[in-house]
Image (cartoon, rainbow, N blue to C red):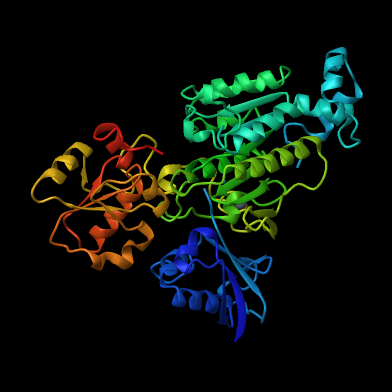
Amino acid sequence: MAKVTVRVPTPLRPLAGGLAEVVVDGATVGGVVEELARAHAGLRRHLFSPEGKLRSFVTIYLNDEDVRYLQRDGTPVAEGDVLSIVPAIAGGAPTALSSASRDRREAIPSAADAFSRDDLRRYSRHLLLPEVGVAGQKKLRRAKVLLVGAGGLGAPTALYLAAAGVGEIGLVDFDRVDLSNLQRQVLYTTRDVGRPKLEAAKERLEALNPGVRVIPHGERLTADNALGVLAPYDIIVDGTDNFPTRYLVNDASVLLGKPNVYGSIYRFEGQVSVFDAQRGPCYRCLYPEPPPPDLVPSCAEAGVLGVLPGLIGTLQATETVKLLLGQGEPLIGRLLLFDALALKFRELRLRKNPHCVLCSPQATQKGLIDYPAFCGVAAPGDEEVGGAVPSIEPEALAAALASTDPPVLIDVREPMEWAIAHLPSARLIPGAELPERVDEFTRARELVLYCRNGGRSAHATRLLLDLGFSNVRNLRGGILAWSERVDPNLPQY
Ligand SMILES: [Zn+2]
């Protein structure tokens, strides 16, 4: 038996007594993880499938090596080893510019290719760098980069790419600017609240650099349109906030042979990598399957430090510019992990999965698939999340609460959300604690569960139904719908 330090990722810490690191005894990776799950029972369903197998979306590193490339569960561990659980969190030279065509263009400078006096001045700090120079600045001007998502990650990326003089910047987004975006989405101002993001972003980026063309793509990226939207671009930057779009962006990039500059954020932590299947692994090599939708909360549910996407998005912009210039060591085959609270960067080696369904020689997936179904979430626009469960409308709940036999109201959100706003007669039982606390309420009375928008509480309702509760309903639309339709004084967040 050896003493091994297990690094617990933030999303799982509440289930491990709030600890970031746990020292566990074991002889093998499997033994250590089993011991961890024994000590902290709540972790078990996150780490193991009902059949007792390690879940495939939980990637485990022994020191800096993925155990899938060692002996998996059977990998022996030694005293002082560090085991990292790296969960999926909700985030080369451009192929379109082959070196031959690039060299040819540079060999024959034309008048149209020349920079104006203003351009020379604007880009002077680039032109002074031997790694960029006039030739590199021209590469940037000829480049076409697509940013999927104009939110927290897309905002700094777009600003820096426009400032750097990337000739064409495509933006995919269909949201409007919300007041709650401004804490991190530095592309927008208070005056933009309510405007379509693409309209505000185009204006801002063209004001920053009139030499840049901004191409808005205002439709939601789907399996039907993704290949067409991505095709004209040299590099794709993944700034999405959900798993279906993340897998879609990865798969379309691999099928089109384009590098995918990946970033994702969660509370105080971020991940960055460059997935270029022609030279290294893709996102599916790292995470063959997404986590179940109720295990990983979104930023809207979990919160995020405002400067974090600034850092991660800026790293994505850095990698994009390096790829376009063909300079430096890209993050291909490496996963950079950032922890803002500890202010630490860690780097893990990523291998190309020899059995990847998408990018390996024996790949079985030759096209795009149904991503909402693959990720187990409702298709965009669908009301129900996590399968249909009995629900109640806000107005009906208000009437029931005023009756002589009101239902028991359970708030499944986190304590921080409760502190912002909650319904008067509710009890707070965060979703993660629900399985262990079901004995606290009687099955004789009707239960109504609610969360922010009805998604998490739908999963919680499903869980209680599966545990044998029969009289349980989900507040449709959550506390947001309640605020809109019953009590406008209740703050929205
Ligand atoms: Zn792959």
Extreme-left residue of the structure: 404
Judge from the rendering whether residue 204 lies leftward or rightward of residue 396; answer left or right. Answer: right
* Residue 300 visible here: yes
Instruction: Tell me the quarter of the picture where residue 446 sits.
Output: bottom left
Of the 4 image quadrants, the one containing the N terminus is bottom right
- Residue farthest top in this picture: 111
Give residue 331's position: percent from left, percent from top: 72, 49
Q: Which of 403/480 is in front? A: 403
Q: Is residue 443 left or right of residue 433?
A: left
In the picture, measured across the screen, residue 405 lies left or right of residue 334, that is left
Quadrant including the C terminus: top left
Image vertical order of residue 345 relative to residue 371, above or below: below
The percent position of residue 30, horizontal first and vertical second, equals: 54, 76
Residue 14 position (above or below residue 255): below
Judge whether residue 261 can be spotted in this image: no
Position of residue 100 measured from the top left corner of the image (x, y, whole percent): 84, 32
Q: Please tell me which residue lies in front, 278 or 26.
A: 26
Q: Residue at x 81, y 39 (%)?
A: 326
